Image (cartoon, rainbow, N blue to C red):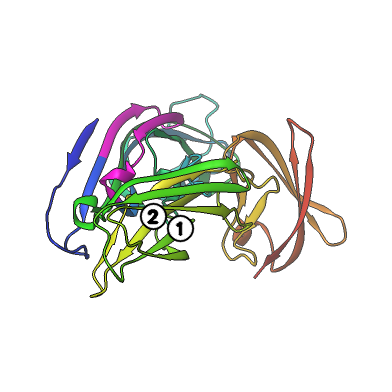
């Protein structure tokens, strides 16, 4: 694991004066694996986290053997190699997914000779660099759950498989090896630039409905104002309430915050200090963890769909799912099984005409059933 920390000391924080804190690690496996990556959360005492980026570089090497099962020759065999990457974590609002495919061929194979793995009806290819340091980049819309003094863990699932086109009567098998470099980068405005005259700032969750907030200041000045601000995504803060500075040299302030229905599982608070001349400074950011808010109903997106429809079963808990697609008449059209999955995919372009369908998802562990409408354009 590599740690990189850039320190700057400019008087203001803009796009040119941001710091980065980065962690990375590399793993090697067989192309169909589950990795676990654990990194430190962003320490809010360092400053204000403005962006979280996750970057991966994937190298995938694939070998395959293809044998024609037809009596007659086939001159147009193509082999497609598919690769799916999925990243899940309690710190993510939904899993991050990426799909990649590469085609090999055309291959011309003679009619079957009845002898496995040899002859003019057989071909072997590899090693093939399907992906060579292929970059997959994500910029997260919600950074709140990366604040804290603990760690954040990612599950990284890879799936590699192949399919032959040209004839359905064929035998194909393949093997894969891959290397994944995983990197997470925190971009932030350093606290040394933003520091306000606040000697103590505490947020205490009384329960999931009430948060007690207190702060103490020094060097109080006339016409100074303090604004308590909150954020539910880690990027945008909005004012909750304001206080005028006290006349004493030091000031003590408190506020009872009522949790809102729109608050996420992590709520961030900070104090904005505004001087009479308009100068602004900020306190460190405090993160308050509420009870996990997770959706129990699977979600289909995009809907309406073009090309493919994604199924989000859960953003935290894997399970085995059976998904059935029905016509409005009730006729079963297609059935899928997704094992140990957070997500699934329906290839709408190749398998269904334009129209309205019903999708039934069954959690095979709990036997819960969910029925949703899918529109294919």
Cα separation between marks 2 and 1: 9 Å
Give whichever of 198, 14 is nearer the camera.
198
Q: Is residue 104 visible?
A: no
Residues in magenta, as a range: 23-47
Q: Say if the magenta span includes residue 246.
A: no
Q: Position of residue 24 (x, y in %)?
A: 27, 36
Report helix, strand or loop for mark 2: strand
Q: Which residue has dot 1 on it?
A: 231
Residue found at x 79% / y 35%: 367
Give whichever of 24, 339 is nearer the camera.
24
User: Does 204 appear above or below 194?
Assistant: above
Q: Position of residue 153 (x, y in %)?
A: 43, 33
- The quadrant of the rendering that contains the N terminus is top left
Residue found at x 71% / y 48%: 297
Q: Position of residue 36 (x, y in %)?
A: 42, 29
What secondary structure predominates along the stretch shown in magenta? strand
Q: Which residue has dot 2 on it?
A: 270
Specify which label sits upstream in the sequence, 2 or 1: 1
Report helix, strand or loop for mark 1: strand
Q: Say if the magenta span includes residue 43.
A: yes
């Amino acid at each position: 694991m590599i740690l990189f920390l850039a320190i700057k000391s400019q008087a203001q924080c803009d796009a040119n004066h941001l710091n980065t804190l980065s962690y990375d690690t590399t793993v090697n496996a067989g192309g169909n694996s589950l990795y676990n990556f654990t990194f430190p959360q962003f320490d809010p005492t360092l400053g204000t986290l403005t962006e979280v980026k996750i970057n991966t570089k994937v190298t995938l090497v694939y070998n395959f053997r293809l044998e024609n099962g037809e009596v007659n020759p086939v001159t147009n065999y193509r082999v497609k190699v598919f690769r799916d990457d999925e990243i899940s974590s309690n710190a993510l609002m939904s899993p991050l997914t990426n799909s990649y495919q590469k085609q090999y061929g055309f291959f011309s194979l003679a009619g079957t000779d009845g002898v496995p793995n040899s002859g003019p009806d057989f071909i072997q290819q590899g090693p093939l660099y399907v992906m060579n340091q292929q970059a997959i980049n994500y910029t997260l819309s919600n950074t709140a759950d990366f604040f804290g003094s603990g760690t954040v863990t990612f599950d990284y699932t890879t799936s590699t498989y192949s399919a032959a086109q040209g004839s359905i009567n064929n035998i194909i098998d393949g093997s894969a090896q891959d290397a994944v470099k995983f990197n997470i980068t925190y971009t932030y405005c350093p606290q040394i630039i933003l520091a306000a005259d606040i000697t103590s700032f505490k947020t205490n969750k009384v329960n999931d409905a009430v948060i007690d907030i207190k702060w103490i200041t020094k060097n109080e000045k006339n016409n100074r104002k303090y604004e308590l601000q909150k954020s539910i995504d880690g990027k945008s803060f909005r004012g909750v309430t304001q206080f005028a500075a006290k006349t004493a040299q030091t000031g003590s302030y408190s506020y009872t915050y009522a949790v809102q229905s729109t608050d996420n599982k992590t709520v961030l608070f900070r104090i904005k200090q505004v001087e009479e001349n308009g100068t602004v400074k900020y306190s460190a950011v405090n993160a308050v963890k509420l009870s996990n808010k997770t959706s129990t109903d699977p979600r289909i997106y995009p809907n309406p769909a073009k090309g493919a429809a994604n199924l989000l079963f859960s953003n935290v808990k894997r399970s085995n799912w059976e998904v059935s697609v029905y016509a409005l008449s009730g006729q079963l059209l297609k059935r899928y099984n997704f094992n140990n999955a957070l997500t699934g995919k329906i290839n709408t372009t190749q398998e269904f005409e334009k129209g309205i369908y019903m999708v039934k998802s069954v959690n095979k562990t709990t036997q819960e059933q969910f029925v949703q409408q899918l529109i294919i354009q």
